[in-house]
Amino acid sequence: MFFKFFLNSSRIPLLKWTLPLLGSQSQPLFSLIGSAVGLRFCRVSFGLISLRLFRHGTRKSVRCALLPGRPPADVLLQMHSVGICGSDVHYWQHGRIADFVVKDPMVLGHEASGRVVKVGSAVKHLKVGDRVAIEPGVPREMDEYFKTGKYNLSPTIFFCATPPDDGNLCRFYKHNANFCYKLPDNVTFEEGALIEPLSVGIHACQRAGVTLGSTVFICGAGPIGLVCLIVAKALGASQVVITDLFPERLALAKELGADFQLKVTGKVEPKQLAKKAEDLLGVQPHVAIECTGVESSIQTAIYATRPGGVVVVVGLGSEMVTLPLINAATREVDIRGVFRYRNTWPMAIAMLASGKVNVKPLVTHRFPLEQAVKAFETTRQGIGIKVMLKCDQEDQNP
């Protein structure tokens, strides 16, 4: 399956549809589903509205659709900052991630923040003008996972930009108010958008049991590896060694607090790399956090971890991998999965507001929404760390 970007340059007549939530001065908001292929922008006279993924080769009739109605518990947001995640690029390039397959046109984006412009009648904790960070996963039902606080595992959960659910890379977006978190004045919109990847780091470190004095081995210094590093140090990890293929990423890891940086080459065997990590730390680490999804890297994480330690698998790669399970079993090394996050936004906001963590260096590129194609290409090519799209035409600041 192949997906492609297309910039819609055709003139779309302004419809007389308006979005009641925006009041009498509202503009018509709609998305285009047409015969184009790939990712297309929806344009009207007042600017680009959203970025939508199309299956290559499909032909559908053109139609316009308003944003969905607003239930009492929802808020309408004017989007400000949306980070591009590797999953967004993966859907564009491959049309699927594991069992999540793009079958219908889908708006991308799930690392986001914005400003409240309308509130539902049942919303009490937010008001118009509030700046919020968006938790993209919203439970659809009160199932056993919801009741036990593990709502991220609910098979029916709504999640932005995971098929078939639309994301929030658009001008305006409607979301459940209970999963919108007010940002303190000293936390920027970009930091608010970065709470999503930061939450992955929080959940991974919690699953791993990182605590005061922990020694930690992190595989991969991409955005997720770096937030795991940031959180591990904030939770009291005494020493952290991190690996990557690219020296510039390791340099940023050092800036963010990594005690040791280990460059990986294709010629190093997993056991050899594990031994190098041990030599740097002076001991085998209590915890290994695997953020690449690469088979050899998961093997390295298992070999590196001390007896009785924990390996958490954050990166998602091939469905089937070969692992040294007997090695892990005989040394009682726990292997734990990590899927997204749960109950992490309040902690993340507190960490940012207090200055305990600094995620600002992660943002290396910024683009207005109109240049989303270039932004996605920048991410695909591995240039920089985090690419941020600015959705508010009147405010392009961090």
Image (cartoon, rainbow, N blue to C red):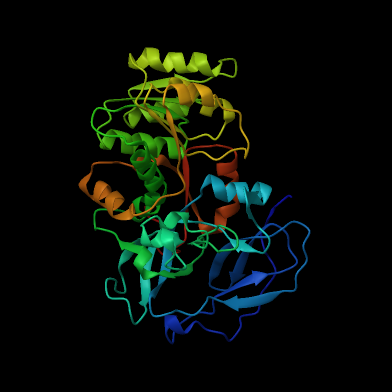
Q: Residue at x 51, y 64 (%)?
A: 170
Q: Position of residue 393 (x, y in %)?
A: 45, 64
Quadrant in the picture for residue 226: top left
- Please say if 20 is above or below 134: below
Q: Is residue 84 visible?
A: yes
Quadrant in the picture for residue 28: bottom right
Q: Is 99 or 2 nearer to us in this picture?
A: 99
Q: Is residue 113 visible?
A: no
Q: How many marks?
A: 0
Q: Is 135 or 133 nearer to us in this picture?
A: 135
Q: Position of residue 35 (x, y in %)?
A: 75, 67
Q: Residue at x 24, y 27 (%)?
A: 213
Q: Position of residue 286 (x, y in %)?
A: 34, 26
- Left or right, 361 with respect to 265, comes to left
Quadrant in the picture for residue 289: top left
Q: Residue furthest front?
A: 330
